[in-house]
Image (cartoon, rainbow, N blue to C red):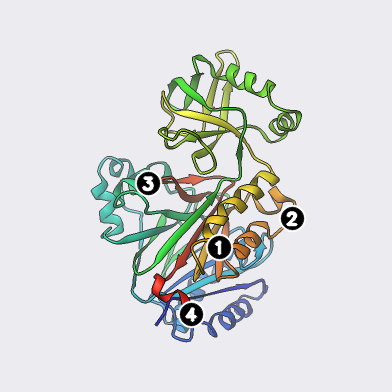
């Protein structure tokens, strides 16, 4: 038996008709059933989330199903940003241990200093290949949770990928599904262990401008000096030396800050920065407040800009690494609800690029209110980002998929 995935997407308005369409797309490929199902649906179908999850488990014989409500969904080559939609990814993964659990009863502030608390929540970390996280943005303390989970994982290289439910604009409006349990708060973790290869792509959709600068004075998330000069003055000096196009981008889109994650590299490029926004400016003192709680003196930052072309180029370049790993069995894609037509001016851009890079492998995902994915050896929550997790079988099974 080899690893096999199937995905389905429906835009039917009637919930039962949408469910039937999805089942019709899944069954022909999953003749031996499924081990795990991911289910994403818009608020139009939210009232049936628990029922549809149970019916999918029964039809496919899956031991586990997880899902959430969202603003829009993604599938093979398609992005549905408005209107009713359901997206499903189901997989049969022989030799792979898949566990799913809620992460609602952990003191994450304490867990950051005591990795055993996080390990107790997610279970045995031996042979852990990946962790997939679905969470409600109003009730999940990701600023504390992700560092705690990163510390609990067995060394570098175990990615955490996922997204924040996006269907609601107020607390208790989102829904999360874990088997027969419906949740309006908290988070769900899915752990992947065993005979599977997992590769990730995280595209933050921004490009660097100017040059790297060292933080020489800071307090909490406020950068006071860069290279010994008032931070705002250093930014203004850099902007004056940019070309007219980049200056216009800053005026229209604003400026972002990329914090270097590995100070020991001689040069910095794509994948070397965690991108964060400016959240405040003190013109009198010359300070810059950055949406990053991990700012420290001695770190290197570089300013960035984001536009449609930068986002396209960044994702296309990073997806080249996926092509060299061979055929994909299936994939999950979490992209920001600020991308899509909001960023590119047209639909299907992220999904089309991923579908092409993975040669139309089964794909499901959703537009998230925050995307989770690794940069370097740790995972972070991002904005305006596309975060992709790809499943591949052991090499000896490649020819059979």
> Please, what secondary structure does the residue beneath circle 2 have?
loop
Q: Which of marks 3 and 1 is in front?
A: 1
Residue for badge 3 = 145
Circle 4 crowding by C-alpha within 10 Å: few under 14, some 14–19, many from 20: few
Position of residue 371 relative to residue 301, above or below, is below
Q: Where is residue 280 in the image (x, y as percent from the top left)?
A: 57, 26
Q: Which of marks 4 and 2 is nearer the N terminus?
A: 4
Number of labels in the image equals 4
Alpha-carbon distance for marks 2 and 1? 18 Å
Residue for badge 1 = 365
Q: Which residue is drawn at 50% across and 38% down?
A: 273
Q: Earlier in the sequence, mark 4 or mark 1?
A: 4
Q: Where is residue 88 in the image (x, y as percent from the top left)?
A: 54, 71
Circle 1 crowding by C-alpha within 10 Å: few under 14, some 14–19, many from 20: many
Alpha-carbon distance for marks 3 and 2? 35 Å
Residue for badge 2 = 346
Q: Residue at x 68, y 22 (%)?
A: 241
Relative to the observer, which residue lies in front, 32 or 186?
Answer: 32
Q: Which of marks 3 and 1 is nearer the N terminus?
A: 3
> Please, what secondary structure does the residue beneath circle 1 have?
strand
Q: Residue at x 60, y 16 (%)?
A: 233
Q: Where is residue 89 in the image (x, y as percent from the top left)?
A: 51, 71
Relative to the observer, which residue lies in front, 164 or 250?
Answer: 250
Residue for badge 4 = 55
């Amino acid at each position: 038996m080899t690893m096999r995935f199937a995905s389905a997407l429906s835009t039917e308005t009637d919930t039962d008709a949408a469910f039937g369409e999805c089942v019709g797309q899944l069954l022909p490929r999953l003749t031996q059933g499924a081990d795990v199902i991911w289910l994403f649906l818009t608020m139009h179908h939210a009232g049936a989330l628990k029922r549809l999850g149970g019916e999918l488990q029964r039809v496919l014989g899956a031991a586990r199903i997880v899902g959430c409500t969202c603003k829009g969904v993604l599938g093979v080559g398609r992005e549905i940003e408005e209107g009713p939609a359901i997206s499903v990814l189901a997989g049969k993964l022989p030799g792979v241990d898949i566990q799913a659990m809620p992460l609602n009863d952990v003191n994450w502030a304490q867990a950051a200093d005591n990795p055993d608390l996080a390990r107790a929540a997610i279970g045995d970390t031996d042979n852990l290949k990946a962790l997939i996280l679905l969470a409600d943005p109003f009730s999940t303390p990701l600023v504390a949770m992700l560092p705690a989970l990163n510390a609990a994982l067995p060394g570098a290289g175990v990615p955490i990928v996922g997204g924040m439910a996006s269907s609601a604009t107020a607390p208790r409006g989102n829904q999360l599904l874990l088997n027969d349990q419906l949740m309006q708060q908290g988070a769900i973790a899915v752990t992947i262990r065993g005979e599977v290869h997992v590769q990730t792509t995280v595209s933050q959709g921004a490009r660097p401008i100017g040059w790297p600068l060292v933080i020489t004075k800071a307090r909490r998330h406020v950068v006071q000096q860069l290279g010994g000069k008032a931070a705002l003055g250093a930014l203004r000096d850099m902007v004056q030396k940019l070309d007219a196009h980049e200056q216009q981008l800053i005026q229209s889109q604003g400026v972002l800050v990329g914090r270097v994650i590995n100070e020991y590299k001689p040069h910095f490029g794509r994948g070397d920065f965690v991108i964060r926004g400016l959240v405040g400016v003190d013109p009198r003192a010359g300070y810059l407040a950055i949406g990053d709680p991990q700012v420290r003196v001695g770190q290197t930052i570089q300013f960035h800009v984001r536009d449609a072309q930068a986002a396209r180029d960044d994702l296309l370049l990073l997806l080249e690494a996926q092509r060299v790993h061979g055929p994909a069995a299936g994939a999950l894609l979490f992209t920001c609800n600020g991308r899509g037509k909001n960023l590119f001016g047209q639909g299907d851009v992220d999904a089309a690029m991923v579908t092409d890079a993975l040669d139309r492998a089964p794909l499901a995902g959703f537009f998230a209110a925050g995307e989770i994915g690794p940069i370097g050896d740790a995972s972070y929550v991002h904005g305006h980002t596309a975060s992709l997790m790809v499943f591949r079988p052991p090499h000896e099974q490649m020819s059979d998929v």
